[in-house]
Amino acid sequence: MPTVRSEDADIVYESLGQGPPVVLLHPFPVHRDFWKPAAQSLTSYRIILPDLRGHGDSAIGDGPAIMSKHANDIARVLDDAGVGRAVMMGVSIGGYALFEFWRRFPGRASALVLSNTKASADSTEARAARLRSAADVLEHGVEPFIESMLPKLIGNTARTMRPDLVEGARRMALKMSPQDISQVQQGMADRTDSIPTLKTINVPTQIIAGEEDALATLADAEAMKAHISGASLAIIQKAGHYAPWERAEEVGLLLRQFLDAHR
């Protein structure tokens, strides 16, 4: 598995297939396997799947996993993979990282897909809750944290009809250590407000929202669409925060259509 040193952490990624490059960034607290079911629809593209720092097989490094670290990690993965410019797709924290990546490396993104994410920073209350969970996981361990998160991450339909998807997400999440989760949570709590960044995005942009997503709501998706010139919005029915995992075939087809239109 390719591994690249980025500042204070080793970042692991996979590269699948041949064709125009596409980078897929997973949500918290899972890893690169999250994207593999949807990526089966993208066989005519080179799919690059990093594990964000602290997730999967990538190290956490020192201190909070702030967005500037994630953005620099993504750039190092592109360098290591020999890719100058790519379509960039991110879910949840993957989207947060893409906003920072765009601010730092706008010339390296040929198009964007922002899935189940939002541009606003945490509210005062949400930031406090995130920091409490960052402390609690160090005291109580990973399993209680993951069990408390799964109902928020996976929509009601998938939880009811597809227990295999819930178990798959659980297995991925359990690769994180308490320290990993704590430092990633601290990094998300400290992220900047990216709403001003939206008006600077001048590449084709697809926004994806889950009908059942209570963490990145339809209102959040509509706000991004309103501020990004020419952006499109697709709402995935019967899907929650993990829409590309819950409705992999549907999202994969949507992504292929977007990529084919902008290759």
Image (cartoon, grey):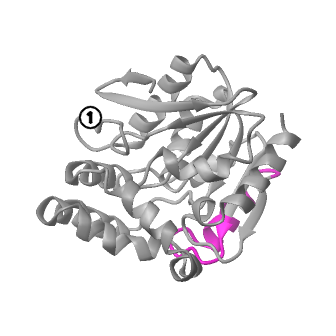
Q: Position of residue 200 (x, y in %)?
A: 68, 42
Extreme residue toward the right, this view: 261
Q: Position of residue 72 (x, y in %)?
A: 45, 29
Q: Residue at x 49, y 74 (%)?
A: 163
Q: Which residue is mark 1?
A: 61
Using the image, determine if residue 69 lies above or below residue 8. Answer: below
Residue 11, quarter of the rendered image: top left
Using the image, determine if residue 118 lies above or below residue 19. Answer: below
Q: Residue at x 22, y 67 (%)?
A: 132
Locate the C terminus and report the quarter of the image it occupies. top right
Q: Residue at x 15, y 58 (%)?
A: 138
Residue 83, quarter of the rendered image: top right
Regarding residue 125, the answer to whether it shows in the image is no
The amino acid type found where label 1 is placed reads: Gly
Near mark 1 (Cα within 10 A), the count class, few <14, some 14-19 or many ≥20, is some
Query: Is residue 72 a member of the stretch shown in magenta?
Result: no
Q: Is residue 52 left or right of residue 120?
A: left
Q: Secondary structure at mark 1?
A: loop
Q: Is residue 130 left or right of residue 166?
A: left
Using the image, determine if residue 225 lies above or below residue 175. Answer: below
Q: Position of residue 54 (x, y in %)?
A: 33, 43
The magenta segment is 209-230
Using the image, determine if residue 6 lies above or below residue 166. Answer: above
Query: Is residue 220 a member of the stretch shown in magenta?
Result: yes
